[in-house]
Amino acid sequence: MEIIAPFSKVFEWTPTLTSIMAVLLGFGFGFSLERAGFGSARTLAGVWYGYDMAVVRVMFTAVVVAMLGLFGLYYLGVLELDLVYVNPTYLWPQVVGGFIFGMGFNIGAYCPGTSLVAMATGKIDGLVFLLGFGVGVLGFAWSFPYIQDFYTSSYMGRLMLPDVLGLPPGVVVLLVVFLAFGAFALTHFVDSKMGNGQGQEQP
Amino acid sequence: MNRLKPAVYGNPYLAGIGLGLVLLAAFVLVGRGLGASGAMTRLSLYTAHNVETAVAGGTEAAHEVLERQNDYVKKYLATESDPLMDFLVYMFLGILLGGFLSGTMARRVSFQVIRGPRASLRTRLLLAFAGGIISAYGARLARGCTSGQALSGGATLAAGSWAYLVAVFAGGFAVAYFFRKEWT
């Protein structure tokens, strides 16, 4: 079949059209997060203490759906994967940064996207998290000259799991689906241990 | 259902499918995923730069103030185009609108501080602020947050993003014991 996606690259969209699309995509993003209950820090913090496992369910479902769609379209020959942005790997900065981010995610009980949704629905703690985030950015920018070498270390370029594992993308996609179902099973096990509801909690 | 009560949250699997379709639409339409921390980074650096220029009080022009910043700041601000006319800043506006509409539809828009049964108002706000600072440092070091790295990078099978995802959960659980009284 003929390559038609990503549209913005194949059909050479104007910056204006791409910006309009960014607003619409953001709209869907914010809407989905709020639907999931992620406008409340209580839902998000549940994953660390086992009283609400929505974070794991929503996140892995979203990753699986988007991944199946993306690689499905690639195998159908309608999407050029090389034109899709894949986060470059800087292994150690990502591991250390991820660990620090996870600590902040636990302590503040929001992440950037969810704090925006919290703020948009009037949650003061979401606004305060956001202000803290702004300060943290300035802290990072200030410290940049001291950590610049680490920041650019262990660069591996556009590295994807199929390359690392030496497997075809289709097989890795299947493995991720299995992993997600394992994670879902685990969340239901936690629910039964903790005596939680069925995952549709009252705000 | 009581009309005055906020609606219960959506089923997490359905919400996840919705989120996944939005993410897929982003790949198909614009060839990139979703992001939230990028816009917040721009807004923060931009605001700080304007404040610094205002404090300089006309003794220095904006471009002179920018001249003595480091490469990281310059990467965001010393650009041909307006630093805020960026894909992620537009997405940021959309997130606010989408979150607000969903919250309105479910009667979940209310001015309040979300906190656990044992946490005081002050403690919760202090921890929200501290958590914001810490996660910003981590997100900038890792070049992305839950949206840009874990979700978008995860779905494209980016190797570093999967390492990031594992590290985020490790970091969260590493400190969970010490902050348990915030929520339980």
Image (cartoon, coloured by chain):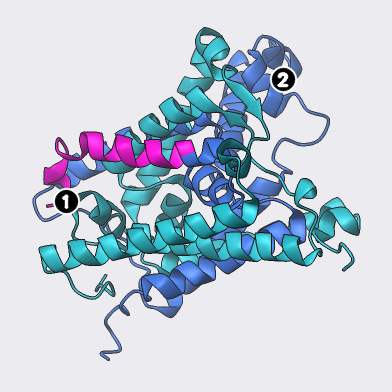
Chain colours: A cyan, B blue
Note whether B29 is above or below B44 in the view shown. Answer: below
Q: Secondary structure at mark 1?
A: loop
Residue on which disc 1 sits: B183
Q: Which residues are magenta?
A: B163-184
Q: Residue furthest left?
A: B118
Note whether A116 is above or below B170 in the view shown. Answer: below
Q: Nearer the viewer, residue A170 or B114?
A: A170
Q: Looking at the image, which residue is at 15% across and 68% down? A: A192
For the residue marked with disc 2, what is the amino acid?
Ala
Identify the main secondary structure in magenta: helix
Numbered tag placed on residue B62 in the rendering:
2
Q: Can you tell which quarter of the image residue A79 is in? A: bottom right
Q: Secondary structure at mark 2?
A: helix
Left/right placement of residue A166 relative to residue A63 reads: right
Which quadrant of the figure contains the N terminus of chain B? bottom left
Note whether B58 is above or below A116 in the view shown. Answer: above
Q: Looking at the image, which residue is at 75% across and 56% down? A: B30
For the residue marked with disc 1, what is the amino acid?
Trp
Q: Is residue B49 magenta?
A: no
Q: Is residue B178 magenta?
A: yes
The local crowd at label 2, few if under 14, some if 14 to 19, many if 20 or more residues have their Cα within 10 Å, is some
Residue B89 x/y as whole percent? 65, 47
The local crowd at label 1, few if under 14, some if 14 to 19, many if 20 or more residues have their Cα within 10 Å, is many
Q: Looking at the image, which residue is at 27% across and 70% down? A: A203
User: Gap between marks 1 and 2, in whole Å?
Assistant: 45 Å
Residue A57 x/y as whole percent? 37, 63
Task: Confirm whether residue A28 shows in the render.
Answer: no
Mark nearer the N terminus (1 vs 2) = 2
Q: Can you tell which quarter of the image residue A155 is in? A: top right
